[in-house]
Image: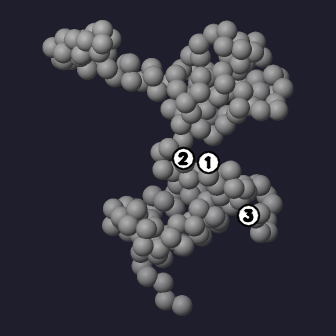
Amino acid sequence: MDVRPEVQVIVDAAAQAKREGRRFTWAERAELIKKQFPTRTKADWVRRFTDDPDMFSDLMRDLLKIDQQVPGKSGPRPGPEFEAGMDLIRKIRGEDYCTLKFSEALAILGHGMSLTALARKTKLSRSQVHRLLNAQMQPSAEEMEAVATAFKKEPSFFLEWRAAYIAGTLASKLEEAPEIGIGLYRKLVGSARV
């Protein structure tokens, strides 16, 4: 079977990794694909998925199966759970946000978990988790990152993270151009008086 030279490079790299007794990672594959097929990184995926919805569903099914893989276990993978699929779609589309307070979001994410199990999963102390769940303290950026990582979320999932990001960005912009702050202040004060 004839293999195109661009593809042969990837096949050879996979074979080399196997000879070295190591796994050919997806990151390595992606890097080689980018080098061999540079136009693929500029594809209009929204149009392609819109034109062929089956391609999108096939891709999602494969991504979910990879996500559910158990290392060292071969064979067919179970189909994805509906909620897991919807979570992944929201993440891919950049729509994975929560509008609840951090304490409420943490309670939902850790539903059914003991304090000890939740602390172990998030790598936070049991007392930190208790105070966060009971809204006895505001979460720090590090705590939000730890919880987000534990539950395969982005820190921006949390309302408090987004509020801090917006406030920090706004403060930075106001320092760069203080005259903007005058107009903004007047608008805010004027709308508060109405």
| Figure label count | 3
Secondary element at image label 2: helix
Secondary element at image label 1: helix
The front one of 193 and 90 is 193
The residue under the point 71% across, 19% down is 133
Q: Amino acid at mark 1?
A: Asp
Q: Which residue is at the far bottom?
A: 1
Residue 62 visible somewhere in the drawing: yes
Dots 1 and 3: beta carbons under 8 Å?
Answer: no
Gap in angstroms between the C-alphas marked 3 and 2: 19 Å
Gap in angstroms between the C-alphas marked 1 and 2: 6 Å
The front one of 136 and 176 is 136
Q: Which residue is mark 2?
A: 91
Identify the mark at residue 79; answer none if there is no mark.
3
Q: Amino acid at mark 2?
A: Lys
Of mark 3 and mark 2, the one earlier in the sequence is 3
Percent x, y for residue 163?
Answer: 45, 22
Q: Which residue is mark 1?
A: 87
Q: Residues within 10 Å of mark 3 (few under 14, many from 20)?
A: few
Q: Amino acid at mark 3?
A: Gly
Percent x, y for residue 44?
Answer: 35, 64
Left or right side of 50 for 133: right
Q: Residues within 10 Å of mark 2 (few under 14, many from 20)?
A: some
